[in-house]
Each structure stands twice: as C-alpha cells, then as structure tokens.
C-alpha cells in the first residue's frame, strides 16, 4: 500500500467548499517538504509544481475545492472522515482529493524523462475558475492526465481511461409579451404562449453528436425550468425558460432558432467545454499503462459530465481523464473512495510519468 490513502484522509478533513486556502496551504507545504519539485502558488490559489526536463511536458491535474458538505459530513474541527471496508468516506474523497493525493505521491516518487507537472486547481466546482485563470496566465502542458473519476465505467473493479467527456451549456430563453386583463386576452400578447412555441422548437432540435477516436458521442438538450406570469387574472408580459444542453466536442444544438419567434431572445449563461483527446497515441499510451497496473481489462470510455480537462483541451493540451472515483459517488452524503484504487491510480500516474519518453 502507498501513502496515498493516508494523504487522502488528511486532505478530506480540510474544509474547502467556501475557501480553498487551507487545503491549498497543505498541498503546497507537503510538496515543498516531500518533493524536489519547484512549487508555486499562483495568484488564483492554484498549486503547481514542476520537476524534470525535456521537450514535452506531462501534467497530473486535479482540484482541491469541493461542493458544500452534508451536515453528517461535518465534524467539530473540519470535515468528518471515516474508514471502513477498505474505503475512505468524507466530502471530497471521490471528487477529488483522493486522486489529488495519488498524483502528489506519484509526482514525489517518479523519475520522469520529461517535464512532469503537478497542478491542483481551485474553483472547479464553480465553473473552472482556477483552471481558466492558470491558462490565461500561460499554463499550457503538452499532455495532461486529469484525475477525475473513471473507475467502474466499463465494468466493476476496473479503472478505465476516458478519452472524451461532454460539456454543459446552460441557456435562458427570454420571452416578451404584452400585458392585458385575462378577460380580454386578445388585447395582449401572451408571453407563456410564445414560450411554449419556443419550447416546441427546443423539443424538436436534434441532439449534438460527434465521433471521438472511433467512438460515437451524443449530447442532449432539455427544457428544465419555466417561469412566467404575475397574477391569475393577467395575461403575462414575460416568461423565462431554462435549457440544459450537454454538448459534445465541436458540436452545439442550434438553439438560436428560438429567436425566429417574435419576442424571443436567447442568453447563454454557462458554457463548460467538452473534451476530446486530441492525440490517439497519448490515449493509447495511458490506456496501455492502466492495463498493466490491474488484473481487469480497462477500456477507453466517455464521461457524461464536464471537468477541467475541457478547459485544458480547448487551450491545446491533449487530455485524458483517469481517476479513482466511481459513478454515483461524487457529491453524495456517503461519498467515498477505495483505498486500493487510490494505490492503483498512484501506480498509473507514476508509470506514465516514467515511461513518457517513449511517446515523446
């Protein structure tokens, strides 16, 4: 067993849903004391370390912020952490302090033949603010393994390699009408009726679809909220409709078609980018490395939701996702991660760092 599980326990105990400073302090201090890397804390609060040299760079990427904990996950002095049946329980164990700990240990122990970079970002859970800030400041590794969950995707007990993931575009359809008394509906323009016309347009839109390294990837589009009207006896002069779209690399649903309806406009509220690995050789390299670390046969898979890999890929980094978290663990009241899988991820990350020259 490596010391990744023990380090995970330490990290999980540190609250980081409102302020990531304390967790970042711990990671920075540990890296300075335990590794021979050059460690920096950038102006956004990200912790970045580098070691080795070469013509190419490989980054092990994670984030140390978490979503707000459930009451049961909070103790007197921080987050509550428990261990039982080979698993570590606590807010952030799966998403994703466990993989951060595995990457920290791999960064410490690897003897890379390339430039090896460790990065733990802030603000992933609120739109990737840390990753975006680092990229704006010049963070641009050639390749990255992002340690979000990829375990148990193809089959139980296997840590797979995700070569792509969906993005998320959240939009609001704003609808204007003309108010009137409900006893004279013809005197106004009913914004809710116009909104239903816009909803019909969304309903009929084709889902975005693409192919990544030979695998078909489909997104989705759905209306998720509607709000309008001010009184039971008034024709509404305004209505809003929320649309959730799961995007795929290079494709978006043509939502702008709703603006062909009079009084209807569209605003994009959030656009988290999808990810597609830009280099098959890199995807195959990490996949093969993952295969030699476990008894099962990992596969190249796709993830349904966005990660910081989307921002990195958009900026030109070839990315894959490979980590300990399993489907259904993140953001739950009993969030947990397997200690054995943390050891496996440590092995994957270290082997990738040490064998990377073959790809370069």
Image (cartoon, grey):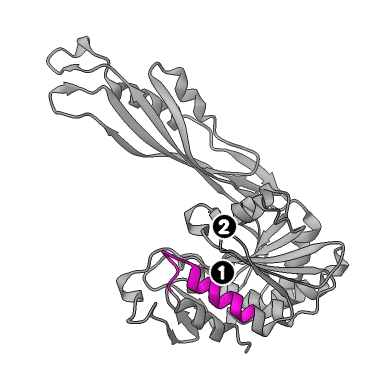
Mark 1 residue crowding within 10 angstroms, few (<14) / some (14–19) / many (20+)? some
Judged by its main secondary structure, the magenta piece is: helix
**Would you name the residue on which mark 1 appears?**
152
User: On the rendered image, what quadrant is the C terminus found in?
Assistant: bottom right
Residue 287, image x and y in percent?
73, 66
Say above or below: 225 vs 187.
below
Q: Spatial distance from mark 2 to mark 1, Cα to Cα?
A: 28 Å
Q: Which quadrant of the figure has residue 122?
A: bottom right
Label 2: element kind: helix
- Whether residue 261 is visible here, answered yes or no, is yes
Q: Is residue 336 left or right of residue 340?
A: left
**Would you name the residue on which mark 2 appears?**
130
Residue 342, image x and y in percent?
59, 79
Residue 285, image x and y in percent?
78, 65
Q: Nearer the viewer, mark 2 or mark 1?
A: 2
Q: Is residue 145 left or right of residue 126?
A: right
Q: Which is nearer the eye, 346 or 36?
A: 36
The residue located at (58%, 75%) in the rendering is: 27
Which stretch is magenta? 15-31
Q: Is residue 349 highlighted in magenta?
A: no
Residue 274, image x and y in percent?
60, 48
In the orientation shown, which residue stands out farthest toward the bottom? 1
Mark 2 residue crowding within 10 angstroms, few (<14) / some (14–19) / many (20+)? many
Count of marks overlaid on the render: 2
Marks 2 and 1, the one that precedes in the sequence? 2
> Badges 2 and 1: C-beta atoms under 8 Å apart?
no
Q: Is residue 296 left or right of residue 280?
A: left
Label 1: element kind: loop
- Whether residue 157 is visible here, answered yes or no, is no
């Amino acid at each position: 067993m490596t010391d990744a599980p023990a380090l995970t326990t330490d990290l999980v105990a540190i609250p980081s849903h409102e302020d990531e400073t304390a967790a970042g302090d711990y990671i920075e201090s540990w890296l300075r004391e335990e590794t021979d890397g050059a460690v920096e804390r950038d102006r956004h609060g990200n912790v970045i370390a580098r070691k080795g040299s070469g013509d190419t760079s490989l980054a092990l990427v994670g984030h140390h912020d978490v979503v707000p904990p459930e009451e049961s996950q909070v103790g007197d002095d921080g987050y509550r952490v428990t261990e039982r049946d080979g698993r570590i329980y606590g807010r952030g164990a799966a998403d994703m302090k466990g993989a951060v700990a595995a990457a920290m240990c791999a960064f410490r122990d690897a003897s890379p033949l390339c430039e090896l970079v460790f990065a733990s970002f802030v603000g992933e859970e609120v739109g990737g603010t840390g990753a975006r800030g680092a990229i704006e400041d010049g963070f641009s590794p050639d390749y990255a393994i992002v340690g979000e969950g990829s375990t148990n995707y193809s089959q139980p007990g296997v840590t797979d390699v995700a070569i792509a993931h969906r993005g998320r575009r959240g939009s609001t359809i704003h609808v204007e009408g003309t108010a009137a008394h409900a006893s004279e509906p013809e005197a106004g323009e009913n914004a809710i009726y116009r909104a239903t016309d816009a909803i019909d347009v969304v309903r009929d839109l084709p889902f975005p679809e693409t192919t990544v390294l030979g695998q078909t990837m489909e997104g989705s589009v759905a209306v998720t909220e509607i709000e309008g009207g001010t009184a039971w006896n008034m024709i509404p002069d305004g209505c809003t409709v929320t649309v959730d779209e799961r995007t795929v690399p290079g494709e978006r649903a043509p939502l702008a078609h709703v603006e062909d309806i009079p009084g209807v406009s569209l605003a994009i509220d959030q656009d988290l980018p999808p990810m597609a690995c830009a280099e098959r050789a890199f995807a195959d390299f990490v996949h093969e490395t993952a295969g030699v670390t476990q008894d099962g046969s990992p596969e190249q898979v796709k993830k349904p939701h966005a990660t910081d890999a989307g921002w990195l890929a958009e900026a030109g980094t070839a990315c894959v996702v490979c980590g300990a978290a399993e489907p259904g663990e993140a953001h739950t009241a009993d969030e947990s991660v397997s200690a054995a899988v943390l050891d496996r991820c440590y092995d994957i990350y270290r082997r990738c760092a040490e064998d990377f020259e073959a790809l370069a």
